[in-house]
Image (tube, rainbow, N blue to C red):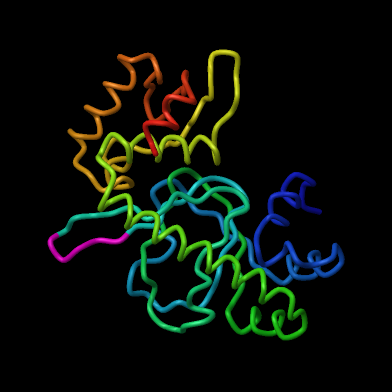
């Protein structure tokens, strides 16, 4: 029997959220569990897309690379997040590479099985369409930020978003264990590592954040939010 907290995490995924308890349990039983270690690649950009995944534990990063070797992070995924669903609606090669940031546990479902569940539970398709709409809105926001926002603003916004998803509130502030290297954080905001480090150092000097290895403590949430607008 899966742990209760794991059930709660999985039920947050769009594929499960529209199902009753019995249907959700049946769907989970039909999915394959996968464990991947830190740094392990789940699939590469260009690989055939034949499954969707739900994160049960850990963190993964989705990224793309250019012909000259430059890399860009599209998103960081955590418990309850679903990914790989684009191949369900538009079969084709993967559009990004998925890599474990830390040791992680996933559930996988083949596309032909997903089609069966959508056919039997039409309301599930609405949740999947909602998820795709959120991805499109997110892509539009990222494009807008790259055009109109300066690097410090993008850094502030990225920290806030990571804090909302992975932060833990403590007496001294919001602890955000994002597990990203400085280079990965720079890739996430689309800037050089040096420029991102300069922005973080400035935030720290102002008393807005405290920097730690692969983590940050947000000390002044409101000011950081304003800087990220």
The residue depicted at 60 percent of the width and 67 percent of the height is 130
Q: Position of residue 37 (x, y in %)?
A: 47, 49
Question: What is the magenta range?
Answer: 64-68
Q: Quick one: quadrant of the C terminus?
A: top left
Which residue extends farthest left?
Answer: 68
> Height in image: 129 above or below 97?
below
> Nearest the camera: 189 or 57?
189
Q: Position of residue 128 (x, y in %)?
A: 61, 71
Q: Position of residue 69 (x, y in %)?
A: 17, 58
The residue depicted at 49 percent of the width and 25 percent of the height is 221
The residue depicted at 79 percent of the width and 67 percent of the height is 19
> Height in image: 51 above or below 134?
below
Asked which quadrant contains residue 194, the reply is top left
> Nearest the camera: 149 or 41?
149
Q: Position of residue 211 (x, y in %)?
A: 37, 21
> Height in image: 68 above or below 150?
below
Q: Quick one: quadrant of the N terminus?
A: bottom right
Q: Is residue 13 magenta?
A: no
């Amino acid at each position: 029997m899966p742990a209760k907290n794991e059930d709660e995490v999985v039920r947050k995924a769009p594929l499960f959220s529209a199902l009753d308890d019995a249907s959700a349990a049946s769907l989970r039983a039909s999915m394959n569990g996968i464990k991947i270690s830190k740094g392990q690649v789940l699939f590469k950009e260009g690989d055939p897309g034949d499954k969707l995944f739900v994160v049960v534990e850990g963190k993964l990063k989705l990224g793309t690379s250019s012909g000259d070797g430059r890399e860009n992070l599209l998103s960081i995924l955590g418990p309850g997040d679903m990914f790989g669903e684009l191949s369900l609606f538009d079969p084709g090669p993967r559009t990004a590479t998925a890599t474990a940031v830390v040791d992680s546990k996933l559930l996988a479902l083949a596309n032909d099985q997903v089609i069966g569940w959508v056919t039997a539970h039409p309301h599930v398709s609405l949740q999947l369409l909602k998820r795709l709409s959120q991805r499109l809105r997110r892509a539009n926001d990222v494009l807008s930020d790259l055009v109109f926002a300066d690097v410090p603003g993008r850094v502030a916004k990225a920290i806030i978003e990571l804090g909302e998803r992975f932060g833990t509130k403590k007496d001294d502030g919001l602890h955000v264990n994002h597990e990203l290297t400085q280079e990965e954080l720079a890739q996430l905001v689309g800037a050089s590592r040096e420029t991102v480090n300069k922005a973080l150092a400035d935030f720290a000097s102002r008393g807005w954040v405290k920097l730690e290895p692969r983590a940050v403590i947000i000390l002044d949430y409101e000011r950081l939010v304003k800087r990220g607008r």
